[in-house]
Amino acid sequence: MPEICCVIAITPLVRELILHLAEQDPSYPVEGKTARLAAVLLEQIPNEPVKELYLPVSDHSKIRHIADALFSDPGDRTTLRQWAAQLATSERSLARLLESETGMSFGRWRQRLHLMVALSHLAEGQSVQNVAGTLGYDSVSAFITMFKKALGKSPTQYFSTAD
């Protein structure tokens, strides 16, 4: 199993195993059919490729403040300099803190947050135009370009092959 929390790409088999097992009584017998299926699932998961969609969030109060604000309003375009002013620190100190706590620059971290929000909203059936607006993009094409650079496919292509 992966050492850290992460997102994995799953095969149709793994997806169906998860869906089936989610409907079963969690106190299944150790020697039953459900136990054997759970064992198959646990054998398959380590073989699945890790996707770079994990969003690290620190418990540091300054980073937590930024994360909470951006989770509640992902379209917020406050710059790193503006966040630093709000948090009574220098832009450079905040940038170093973000890098050390999350392993990412502020811009990369915010883009990853946008991808996570976008995937969630698109999976719920929201339109690409609506999601682009929620994330504060000036145009749908700018959002599609970001999505395609990050995931290698447009939102439509991504969801047509995700199943």
Image: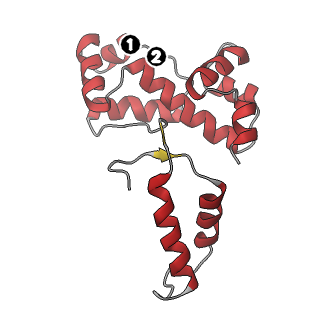
Q: Few, some or many C-alpha atoms within 10 Å of disc 2 (few <14, some 14-19, many ≥20)? A: few
Q: Residue at image x 56%, y 25%?
A: 150
**Residue underneath mark 2:** 78
Please give left or right for residue 139 compared with residue 21 in the image.
right
Three-letter amino acid code at disc 2? Answer: Thr
Q: Is residue 158 above or below residue 82?
A: below
Q: Is residue 136 above or below residue 117?
A: above
Residue 116: x and y in percent read 55, 36
Q: Quadrant of the N terminus?
A: bottom left
Of residues 154 and 79, the one drawn nearer to the viewer in this rendering? 154
Residue 105: x and y in percent read 36, 20
Q: Residue at image x 32%, y 31%?
A: 102
Of residues 125 and 77, the one drawn nearer to the viewer in this rendering? 125
Three-letter amino acid code at disc 1? Answer: Gln
Residue 32: x and y in percent read 53, 87
Of residues 67 and 149, the one drawn nearer to the viewer in this rendering? 149
Q: Secondary structure at mark 2?
A: loop
Residue 83: x and y in percent read 36, 18
**Residue underneath mark 1:** 82
Q: Residue at image x 59%, y 20%?
A: 149
Q: Is residue 95 above or below residue 51?
A: above
